[in-house]
Image (cartoon, grey):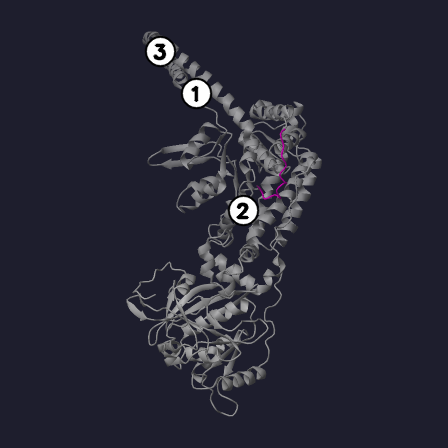
Amino acid sequence: MTAYQEPSSLEQPKDILANCTLYHPQDGAFMRHPVMESYGHPNRSIYVDESIVDIDATKYENPMILPIYNGQLELIQCAVLQDEQKVQILPDSSARGFAYYGELKKDKPIIVCYELDTFFKLAQTYYSTVLVVLPDLCRTKNLTLKQVDVNNIEAVINQLWNAGYKQLYIPTRPQNKEILLEIARSQKAQLIDQYRNDGTFMEITQYETAQEVQAFIDDAVKELPVFQEVWKEPKQIKSELLPVKKITKDMLPTDVYTYCADEAKRADNMTFDLVAVCLLTSLGALIGARVAIKPKQLDDYSIVPNLWGGIIAPPSSKKSPAISAGTRHLDRLVLQAKEQFELEQKESIAKGIVFKSTEKSLAKKLDKVEEAQDKLKLAQEIADMQTEAEKPPVLKRYFTNDSSPEALADLERSNPNGILVIRDELIGLLSSLDQNDTDTGRAFYLEGWNGTGSYQFDRITRGSGYIQNHCLSVLGGIQPDKLMSYLEKTIQGMGNDGLLQRFQLLIYPDLAQWQYADIKGDKDAKEAVFNLFKQLDGLTEYELTKLGAKPIDDFNARPYFRFTVEAQQAYKAWSTQLNSQIIPKEEHTIIQEHLSKFGKLMPALALIFHLVDSVQLGVSVGGVSLNCVEMAIKWCDYLESHARRIYGMVLHSSTFKASALAIKLKKLNHNEAWRLDGFTARDVHRKNWKGLTELNAVNEALELLVDYDWLNEQEIESTVRGGRPSKRYLINPKIYDSLK
């Protein structure tokens, strides 16, 4: 190339070398090149760009070009060298690899240097030689290293080491020995002191003969011990979820079990437990605050069976179809309620017309009445007729998918048995309740979980209101990683008011294996369960007392059941074991808090099962039976195993995070920079990988991977005076042995 050129930043290294001329040692121009005159020569061919190159407003005339390689000896960059000028790197601004002469062999010594004259002289020996391309390579001799230079040298050492080159040696001048000890301590390279044993100094420049330098290196290498492999065997990272129980046939009424099994099978073998929990939550919500159970024989404490359910599963695991199958019968009730509402609207209009037609005659009649008491009585009758005529019909509601606390309060006022809140993604609801600490929405939900109390609210804009039965049920799905992030805040004490622990029907099941299915649905099972929903929805105080419930009185706002004698004994034994053994011996507070709410869960489930039995038989079966209590206890055992798995994701979250990062590291290609040069915590954080989106989560994972010998942590001194050192992590090459 003879014409002036301005190199393109996109020019590839192979294209740069293709446009160069090779100068050979026997050529006169080889020795006359300015770089050769100043630093000696390698006695090997060099690349020269026979043109004037302008880089960053600096002209380079006939510069020498050094190819730069990575640990796999792939050409990645070129260094542009001219005497007394800063080295320029193309196409990047800084070197990501090294230059070398000779054949690099993994079982032979490799000499690593950082000065050009040393590099050229060593190239004349039979030693393979690597050059760390520092910016001042052509401007300084007898270089005193700065920390940034050491960082560059260390990066090259790591590249070579990770690529399998273990016999690495660095000739060291006295002024650099102390700062290079940092690299020596890593046990990846050994320092060769350029002071001989006899006190003389070996310069390793153009002024020594190749034979002298070679003999010096021979003696030094013989005296230094051969490094043993420093990487330990990486330990296995066990990030398995804790085991959970499965729902068995004896845990559900027959018709309910049959329906859930059919729905799961037809949805290509959807996980059965997902459907069952959604259906059970729907049953509890449907019964709501209309009836209670008093779990103690004499005490008046009562429980209503509204429940909060949640299904945890990864994306595309049929959470939405499970919710749909579990709430389908509520949808049918909604359609019937709308039909009834339309009829009542017509009746209301008719009543209004009748009242208007008689209003004038009633007024005249009132005028004719002379006795004050008779007049007042007639006026009251007219007022009652007017109120009845103007009273709008109320649409019966069973659930809502999206509602503010204020709108939810209005729904509850019109639906005293309670409302089910269904959210496909529960994290949306949880996040909205976290957004504003002063918002009453969170407290509204917390109090609605009890289901037995009233709720009085007063607002400047909305006025006052009263909810007779403040009873909320909740159902939705959530992804494991999103729940983990939410749980971490809860366990760390940020907003832990027991909101999540109220999700007693919260499960994280093992997913069933997908199986293609194209079969007709079980119509009988579907109709049987719908009839069950319809009968439960029609339970009035009268119907409930016919089924054995105690009636409403001055001290009880709703009908209620108690246990039979045998069931009471089973409940007492279960409650005693829970509260005197299981909870006190539990080491994790968050699990203690969750299990403490089983005091409501078990009686509520027993009541649901009892009501199912009662409406299906159609006669009074007395108190809540032992069989229903035993079913409820099995559910509590089942749900306890799921609670331990769920909270275990965070209580042992470091392992899960480390496992997530370990999977990513094992997928790295052999020539990726992380495998060659290592990486920082911020490098991982910027990837925004699932489970590693927070920097503290990344640091937890890295700390565990270091403990498990997957990584080696190195502190890198700051290049800024007074700056804090940073940490860099090198990958143990042994983690890839299983992939070979």
Residue at mark 3: 356
Badge 3 marks a residue whose secondary structure is: helix
Q: Which is more N-terminal, label 1 or label 2?
A: 1
**Residue type of the residue flagged with mark 2:** Pro
Tell whether 208 sits left or right of 365.
right
Does residue 700 lie above or below 340 as drawn?
below
Front of the two marks 2 and 1: 2
Instruction: Work out whether residue 292 or residue 81 is closer to the camera in this orientation and state it.
Output: 81
Estimate the x, y position of residue 596 in percent, counting from the top left: 58, 46
Instruction: Work out whether residue 600 or residue 99 is closer to the camera in this orientation and state it.
Output: 99
Q: Which is more N-terminal, label 3 or label 1?
A: 3
Q: Is residue 547 visible?
A: no
Residue 507 is covered by the magenta coloring: yes
Task: Considering the whole magenta stretch, tell me its main secondary structure.
Answer: loop
Instruction: Work out whether residue 154 or residue 600 is closer to the camera in this orientation and state it.
Output: 154
Q: Which residue lies furthest to the front in this view?
A: 27
Residue at mark 2: 480
Q: Residue 393 carries which label?
A: 1
Front of the two marks 1 and 3: 1
Estimate the x, y position of residue 193 in percent, counting from the top left: 50, 84
Estimate the x, y position of residue 711 in percent, counting from the top left: 55, 64
Q: Quadrant of the N terminus?
A: bottom left
Q: In which quarter of the image is the C terminus?
A: bottom right
Badge 1 marks a residue whose secondary structure is: loop
